[in-house]
Amino acid sequence: MAVCQFAQVVFEVEWHPVMWALPAVPALLGVAAVVAYYFIRRGGSRILMVSILMISAFLSGALLLGNILPNYALFQAAKRGAYQVVEGTITDFHPQLRDQRTYESFTVSGITFRYSTYEMTVAFHDTAGFGGPIHAGMHVRIAYLGNRILKLEECR
C-alpha cells in the first residue's frame, strides 16, 4: 500500500461548528415561559401554562441530548486530536442513491464506515447520490471516531 504523499482535504468536521445551536435550548424555554406568563395574565389556565413549560423543557432536553451534545463531542474530539487515522483504498463501496433513504458504506483497510445524507451530524455524510466525493478505488486518509468521519483527505 502506498503512503499518502500529498493529501487534499475534502472534508473536515471543524468546518461545521455546532456552537450556534447551544443557545437554542435556553431560548426555547425562555420563549415558552414568556408565552405562559402572558397567557396566565389574561386569565388562562395554570395547568395549561405548566403543560406548555413541561413540553418545551422536554423538547429542549431532547434537542440537547439527542443532537447537540453528540455533535459537540465530535467537534471537540477533532480539535483535541482524539481520534484514529486509517489510510488506504476504498473497497466494498455501496453508494446511497438520491431517491433512497438508505446508507452509504465503504471499507478502508478493514475499517467500515456507514453514513447517510439524512443524518443530522457534523461528521461526514455527503453521499454519492447527492454529489459526495467518495467513489470506489479512491485512495484516502480518514480521521475518525467510532464510525464517524472527522476528516477526509484524498491522497494523490
Image (cartoon, helix red, strand yellow):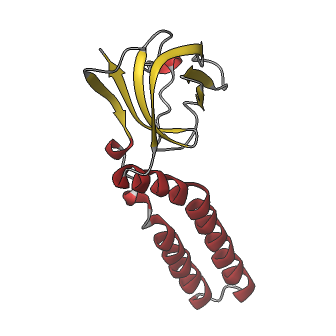
Can you say whether 142 is above or below 40 in the image?
above
Q: Position of residue 153 (x, y in %)?
A: 35, 27
Image quadrant assignment for residue 63:
bottom right
Can you say whether 14 is above or below 68 in the image?
above
- Residue drawn where x is 57% and y is 90% of the image: 41
Comparing 155 with 150, the one in front is 155
- Residue drawn where x is 41% and y is 22% of the image: 140
Residue reaching furthest left? 6
Comparing 144 with 46, the one in front is 144
Residue reaching furthest top? 137
Q: Position of residue 48 (x, y in %)?
A: 71, 80
Comparing 29 with 111, the one in front is 111
Q: Is residue 131 left or right of residue 36?
A: left
Q: Which quadrant would the N terminus be assigned to in this image?
A: top left
Image quadrant assignment for residue 107:
top right
Can you say whether 71 is above or below 137 in the image?
below
Q: Is residue 156 left or right of residue 119?
A: left
Q: Position of residue 21 (x, y in %)?
A: 43, 59
Q: How many marks?
A: 0
Q: Is residue 131 left or right of residue 114?
A: left
